[in-house]
Image (cartoon, rainbow, N blue to C red):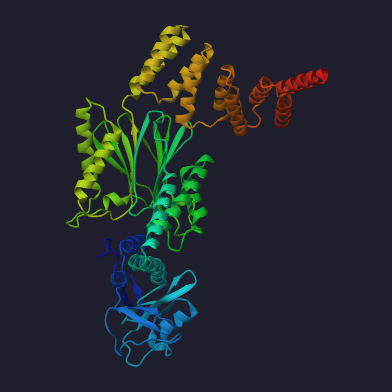
Amino acid sequence: MVDFKVSKRMLVNFRGQNKVVGGLTDKDKIAILLYISKEFANLDREDQLFSKVILICQEIFESDNTTLRLWDGEYLVPVKFVKETEPPRRNLVMGEGYSGSVFETKEPVLVNDLTRSAHFFDEGEKTKSVMCVPIMQKEEILGTLAVESERENFYIIDDLEILEALTSQLALALYGVRLIEGLVTARAREAAILNQLEWDLKMGRNVQSQILPQDLSAWNGIYFASHYEPMAEVSGDLVDIVRQGHSLTAINIDVSGHGIPAALVTMAIHHQFRRSVMAGLGLTEIMEELGEKLREQLPESTYFTAFMVRIFSDYTFGYVNAGHQRMLHYKAADDTFIQYDTKGVPLGILPVRKIDYEEKQGKLEPGDFLLLISDGFSEQRNHLKDEVGVDRILTWLQDERERLVMEGRGKVDLKKLANAFVERFRAYQGEVPNGDDLSFLFLYCGDSIPEASHYIQMAKQSNSKMKMEEAYAQALKAFSIDSSLKEILVFLGKMYYRDGKYNEAIRYLEEYLRTSGDNTAASHFMMGRAYYKAGMISEAKRALKMALSSDHSFAKASILLAQCYLKENAKPKAIKVLQQGVKNTPQSLELKTSLLRLESHSQKVG
């Protein structure tokens, strides 16, 4: 049974004509597409698939009869229907009746009154209105699906569009089912073929795993824990994190379907997501980019849902939802959960613009956490066929957090919380296999941030008063409390550099760049200058080139890079760097002077 309500349609007489009212709303359409995809994904036999199609058509379209026909090379054969007709169904040749006509033209038809379409109407026929659509796999036509009513004018164009979407997913599901059944046969016939396929799938999982976040080190007091578990060898779920210095953007994605096709889509989404974030786009703009850049590339009837959140250095955050499971926000201050949702449709179904999505804001406080999670967790059933549900997830998280707080004397170990949540899920699931791909991402705001921030402010005050020993002691105390805070890392890096302790400066600046994701020219120049002072010329050149790639007009970076080449006795390269610098920044007197001095010295030596 469908797990949502569709408003019932009925016929009314208006000015002597019967017209249908009620039926599908826009919200119904999205719910139906999601429902169809979910139902088809769990079927692995043709008879199950055909029965499900007939049931769905009865529930959604209130049909009196539904007929599924498949082409056997000579005839359109009725393989599944609700009830036998009068006269009885027969095999059809191409072009015969409405099913044969649809098969021949590959175009859907909506007939409001069959009695007025003599070429479609059999004597004694009870069906009055019909929708019939081709079942297509790319350019190959497999058969037809007809939804029939004994009342004329019972269907409208919106119904036909939904039936077309249903048959598109039916074609994909039928292809997958036949592949599975073929694999079963192949296993019995030739084990070597299956072994090769299994090896390919494992390789696919290894490749796909490389797009998952490899670095879960903390970012400015935000800690991470994730879980990723494909239903098969490869997954249609994805979690990703992009660090950008003053902000962090995270996403959780769920692609319709399972296996290799869904996994390939996640890799394309991963690339486009990172590209969009690094381009500096806002959250709603990224949703538009994901939808429009990928829609034409997606396999037929494939779509995906996504939830995206961007956290800033002051712990405010923005979020956008595209038909995904709601994000959960645990608020430590009052031990409650908030579920976040916004206006937004799944991606890949229809053309979308940023105005189709809504961005909302929130704020993280110390001890809070956000949870991006796919619906594979909430929709998992146990042996009694009971779903986990969101409420049970919230209870598990609260219970396990409370237990860990007591064990940790007020502190929460995020990895232990994530592991405990998975254990509770496994206990509820029992021996029942996963019904979907699973993924989640915790983003935890460290409860030590206020204490560490207090010490760094004291260090800054001591530094301004030239109390160097106190400044170092307080900054290192802050670092020992929370080593991920950007402010602490930059402060220590600059202090050690100022005092000529370049190796120590490098330690903290490297950690800052690694964990913050700061890719600005100023940050790479700061790193290059420290390397240069420490005599690490190769490292200095690399950092300075990165600074110039971020800002080619950065005069100081060009001058210092030229000095690096001079250290290596590579004067021609130094001159070339300065010449390029002058070309990029013609207003820089310092660059011009450095170039003239170096060229003049070269001429004298020559």
Please indicate, yes or no, whether residue 227 appears anywhere in the rendered image: yes
Q: Position of residue 446 (x, y in %)?
A: 33, 28
In the rendered image, the residue lying farthest to the bottom is 123
Q: Is residue 588 left or right of residue 64?
A: right
The residue lying toward the viewer, choosing from 327 and 377, is 377
Picture quadrant of residue 54:
bottom left
Q: Position of residue 577 (x, y in %)?
A: 70, 28
Q: Is 89 drawn above or below residue 328 in the view shown?
A: below
Q: Position of residue 18 (x, y in %)?
A: 35, 80
Q: Is residue 262 left or right of residue 81?
A: right
The residue lying toward the viewer, choosing from 70 and 536, is 536
Please state, as top left, top right, bottom left or bottom right, where the N terminus lies in the image: bottom left
The residue lying toward the viewer, choosing from 322 and 503, is 503
Q: Is residue 124 left or right of residue 410?
A: right
Picture quadrant of residue 522:
top right
Please state, as top left, top right, bottom left or bottom right, where the C terminus lies in the image: top right
Give me the residue at 34% from left, 51% from top. 230
Picture quadrant of residue 58:
bottom left
Q: Position of residue 39 (x, y in %)?
A: 31, 63
Q: Is 340 drawn above or below residue 102 in the view shown?
A: above
Q: Is 199 drawn above or below residue 49 in the view shown?
A: above
Give me the residue at 31% from left, 51% from top. 375
Please indicate, yes or no, whether residue 16 appears anywhere in the rendered image: no
In the rendered image, the residue lying farthest to the left is 384
Give me the residue at 32% from left, 24% from top. 448
Q: Is 438 drawn above or below residue 126 in the view shown?
A: above
Q: How many marks?
A: 0
